[in-house]
Amino acid sequence: MSLYKIGIVDDHVLFAEGISRIISQRSDFSLSFIINTLEGLEQIIREQAIDILILDVNVPPGNGIQAIDPLKSAFPGLQIMILTMYQPSDIGLQIRNFTGDAYLLKISGKHIFEEALTSLTERIPYFDPNIIETTIEADKENPYIKLTKREKEIIALIAEGKTSKEIAAKLFLSELTIKTHRKNISEKLGSKGVADLILKTTHMR
C-alpha cells in the first residue's frame, strides 16, 4: 500500500488538529506538517515532498485560492484540496474555473473528507456534494455540461446497469454519497427516472 504524505495550511489550529487526527487513523496517509501561513510554503513542500495539500481560503498573508496556480506550476504532481467554511459563490468562485483538485466545506462530515482523500490518491477531482447544486453554471442549451466528471462517471455506470451499492463499491465511496450524486444529476437534467436520465445524457455527449 502506498503512503501518501499530507500537508495542512490552516490558521484555525484546533480545526487543523482535528483533521490531523482523522489522517492519523488511516494507514495509507501520513501527516508531514501543519502550518498557519502561506509564507515559506513552497520551500516546505519541496523539503517534505508531500502528495496532498489541504489548504484553507483565508490564510495569511494572502488567499488560498490564489495560491493554487503558483503551487501547481511549481509542483505539477501535487493534489490540492481547498477545505473552507465558504461556499464557492461566497468568494466569487465558479467551480468550472477552479484549478484545484478538491473543494470541501468544513461543515461536511468525516466520511466526505475521507472520500475526497481517496479520490485524490486516484487523481480524481472531488467536489463536496453540498456545494455542487448552487455553484456550477451551464449553457442552458446543453444541460450535460452542468455535470461534474464524477457525475458523468456515475451515469456511465448506471448505463451499465449497476446499482447504487455496486457503484459505491467500484468508486470506493459510500452508498449515501452515490444516492446524493444521483439526486443532483436528476435535478440538473430534469430527469424523472434512470431510463430518462440515460437517454438524455446519451444524446448530449
Image (cartoon, helix red, strand yellow):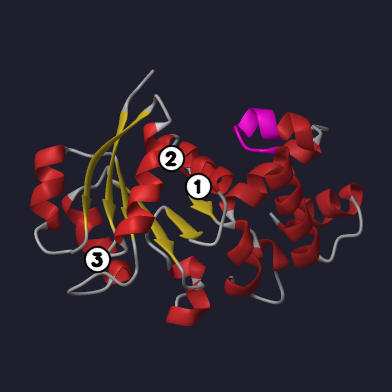
Picture layout, residue 12 above or below residue 76: below
Earlier-in-chain disc, 1 versus 2: 2
Q: How many marks?
A: 3
Please tell me which residue is depicted at 50% across the width and 41% down the height of the picture: 114
According to the image, label 3 marks what residue? 67
Secondary structure of the residue carrying tag 2 is: helix
How far apart marks 1 and 2 lie (CA) works out to 9 Å
Residue visible at 67% across and 28% down in the picture: 169
- Frontmost of labels 1 and 2 is 2
Give amino acid for label 1.
Answer: Phe
Q: Amino acid at mark 2?
A: Ile
Task: For label 1, count other residues whose C-alpha is less than 10 Å away and answer few (under 14), some (14-19) or many (20+).
Answer: many
Q: Position of residue 45 (x, y in %)?
A: 16, 46
**Which stretch appears magenta?**
168-174
Mark nearer the N terminus (3 vs 2): 2
Picture coordinates of residue 22 (x, y %)? 43, 40
Which image quarter is the N terminus in? Answer: top left
Q: CA distance from mark 3 to mark 2?
A: 25 Å
Left or right of residue 97, residue 129 in this image: right
Which residue lies under the disc numbered 2?
22
In the picture of the structure, the residue carrying the numbered disc 1 is 113
- Residue furthest toward the front? 14
